[in-house]
Amino acid sequence: MNGKTMARRDFWAGGLLVALGIAVWLKSRGYGLGSLGHMGSGYFPAVLGILLVLVGILIAATSKDTAMLRLPSRAAWRGASLVLLSVLSFVWVARHLGLVPASFCVVAVAASADRRNSLRDLMLMAGILTLACYLVFSLALHVQMAAFRWEW
């Protein structure tokens, strides 16, 4: 695949985002927009459609001859897989054990994606961010998720 093919792909990908953004925006007009203070059900889709159009225009406008893309390295696959696994683990652990264990788990798994993190650093990061999550989401914002639970 040469650079011109990649440039054409970027151009058409940008065009596809523009078309999708216009379709989302047109569909959102059927719902009430409301105002910034009292958003209606169509406000978020309208903003999302406009952002898709802008990003699509940006991608299409910057498409040019580029070097052929290379496959990601093994380390990149490992990192991406662990970050994805951390999100999935948060969902499962939060459902069965609560916010605090899930927060610890998501940080520990995602931080292990970087091989430079030692076990001490990983546990320190997970502990501090778990405490921050508990303080912000449970105590300050009163998010409707139990801090601890035991359900199987």
Image: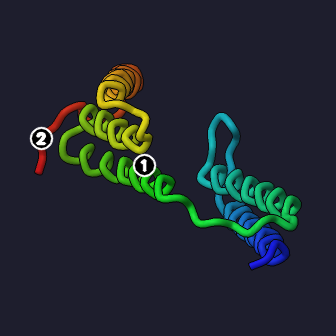
Count of residue discs: 2
Q: Is residue 97 visible?
A: yes
Question: Is 105 or 99 nearer to us in this picture?
Answer: 105
Q: Position of residue 76 (x, y in %)?
A: 51, 54
On screen, residue 21 versus residue 89, left or right, reads right
Q: Amino acid at mark 1?
A: Val
Point out residue 127 in the picture as x, y percentages from the top left corner: 31, 24
Which mark is on residue 83? 1
Disc 1, SS: helix
The tag earlier along the polypeptide, 2 or 1, is 1
- The quadrant in which residue 54 appears is bottom right
Q: Label 2's element?
A: loop
What residue sits 65% from the left and 56% below the top? 45
Q: Nearer the viewer, residue 97 or 118?
A: 118
Labelled disc at residue 150: 2
Quadrant of residue 117 in the image? top left
- How many residues crowd mark 2 within 10 Å: few (<14), some (14–19), many (20+)? few
In the rendered image, which quarter is residue 30 located in?
Answer: bottom right
Compared across the picture, whether 140 is left or right of 89 comes to: right
Label 2 or label 1, whichever lies nearer to me, is: 1
Q: Residue at x 74, y 79 (%)?
A: 1
The CA distance from mark 2 to mark 1 is 25 Å
Question: Given the image, on which type of amino acid does mark 2 rest?
Answer: Trp
